[in-house]
Image (cartoon, grey):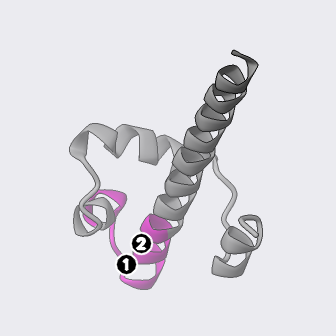
């Protein structure tokens, strides 16, 4: 019983970490396209094929997240 509870907790933590990683990488890519290709956030999300249902979430993350370099983004993953 305890093993299955521990496995469940681990699985939920893994899923949450994966979700946050995908969000951070997506924000980085959106911001990069905006800066390097002079795109709006909507244009960048369209190029990246972000679901329109998630546009507002990513606009909020863009507004409230720290600008990171590619190295900073992936250094934290190690």
- Identify the residue shown where x is 37% and y is 39%: 56
Residue 32 vs residue 50: left or right?
right
Residue designated by label 1: 38
Quadrant of the rendering where the N terminus is positioned: top right
Where residue 6 sits, quadrant-wise, is top right
Residue designated by label 2: 34
Using the image as rendered, state which of residue 21 and residue 57 is in the foreground. 21
In the rendered view, tell whether residue 38 sits above or below residue 12.
below
For numbered disc 2, what is the local secondary structure? helix
Magenta-span inclusion, residue 35:
yes
The span shown in magenta is: 29-43
In the rendered view, tell whether residue 71 sits above or below residue 58.
below
- Identify the residue shown where x is 52% and y is 46%: 19
Residue 27 vs residue 8: left or right?
left
Residue 3 image point, x, y percent? 71, 26
For numbered disc 1, what is the local secondary structure? loop
- Identify the residue shown where x is 50% and y is 41%: 60
Using the image as rendered, state which of residue 22 and residue 10 is in the foreground. 10
Residue 22 image point, x, y percent? 50, 56
Residue 51 vs residue 78: left or right?
left
Magenta stretch, main secondary structure, is: helix
Mark 1 vs mark 2, CA separation in Å: 5 Å
Using the image as rendered, state which of residue 6 and residue 57 is in the foreground. 6
């Amino acid at each position: 019983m305890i093993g299955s509870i521990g496995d469940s907790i681990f699985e939920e933590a893994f899923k949450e970490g994966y979700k946050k990683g995908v969000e951070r990488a997506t924000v980085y890519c959106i911001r990069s396209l905006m800066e390097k290709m002079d795109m709006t956030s909507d244009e960048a999300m369209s190029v990246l094929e972000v679901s329109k249902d998630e546009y507002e979430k990513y606009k909020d993350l863009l507004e409230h997240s720290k600008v990171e370099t590619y190295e900073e983004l992936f250094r934290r993953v190690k």
